């Protein structure tokens, strides 16, 4: 088997409008951030238009909701309210504590709408994936006690199977449990 990050603790940071990464504060895979840390600033004409609608429109037609739909979070909207003027460089903040596990942009990069900029992974909880012969699969179900042994360190950890994957590997004829 092997150890894998929990996809439940993965946070994709995407942009919803086309534009340019102006400043990249988190610029390498492996960088660790805390919730609310500035990740990058972004220039987008569409995002500037949404800010204009918000500032000039007096919140008509729920302009704040449009800002959220364009990707601005509460922290960035608060900065816009406080400044009372356009944020030419819209800040994007970390949605959770984590480590950068994927970085798809560099300073000055043009990003199209929907593209991922980076992914944050919280490694405080990981999954142990075990590969079992098909003959043993009928004896394992969610809730079955399990132990994970690391021969390199001699450590053993107790756990519980929480998921039995419904598909088997056609080459090895093994099933996988988590």
Image: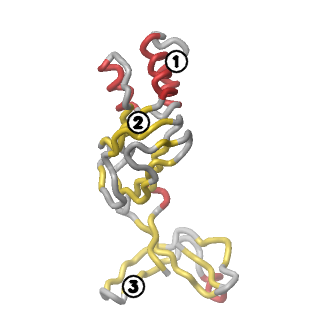
Judging depth in this view, the residue of 148 and 85 nearest the camera is 85
- Can you give x and y, in whole percent of width and height, for residue 22 in the image? 37, 38
Q: CA distance from mark 2 to mark 1?
A: 23 Å
Residue lying at the far right in this picture: please name it.
170
Q: Secondary structure at mark 1?
A: loop
> Horizontally, is 129 left or right of 164 in the view?
left
Q: Which mark is residue 62?
A: 1
Q: Which residue shows up at 46% across the image and 48% down it?
A: 117
Which of the marked residues, 1 or 3, is nearer the chain's N terminus? 1
> Horizontally, is 169 left or right of 80 in the view?
right
Judging depth in this view, the residue of 47 and 21 nearest the camera is 21
Frontmost of labels 2 and 1 is 2
Q: Residues within 10 Å of mark 2 (few under 14, many from 20)?
A: many
Judging depth in this view, the residue of 151 and 93 nearest the camera is 93
- Can you give x and y, in whole percent of width and height, for residue 71 in the image? 48, 34
Frontmost of labels 1 and 3 is 1
Q: Secondary structure at mark 2?
A: strand
Q: Which residue shows up at 32% across the image and 84% down it?
A: 155
Q: Which residue is mark 3?
A: 149
Q: Residues within 10 Å of mark 1 (few under 14, many from 20)?
A: few
Q: Which mark is residue 42?
A: 2
């Amino acid at each position: 088997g092997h150890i894998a990050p929990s996809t439940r603790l993965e946070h994709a940071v995407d942009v919803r409008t086309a534009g340019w990464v102006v400043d990249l504060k988190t610029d390498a895979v492996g960088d660790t951030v805390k919730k609310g840390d500035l990740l990058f600033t972004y220039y987008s004409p569409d995002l500037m238009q949404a800010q204009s609608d918000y500032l000039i429109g007096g919140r008509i037609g729920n302009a704040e909701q449009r800002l959220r739909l364009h990707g601005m979070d509460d922290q960035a909207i608060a900065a816009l309210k406080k400044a009372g003027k356009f944020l030419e460089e819209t800040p994007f903040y970390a949605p959770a504590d984590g480590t950068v596990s994927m970085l798809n942009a560099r300073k000055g990069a043009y990003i199209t709408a929907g593209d991922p900029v980076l992914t944050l992974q919280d490694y405080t909880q990981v999954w142990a994936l075990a590969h079992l012969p098909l003959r043993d699969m009928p004896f394992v179900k969610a809730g079955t006690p399990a132990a994970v042994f690391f021969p390199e360190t001699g450590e053993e950890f107790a756990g519980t199977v929480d998921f039995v994957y419904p598909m088997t590997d056609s080459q090895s004829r093994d099933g996988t449990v988590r």
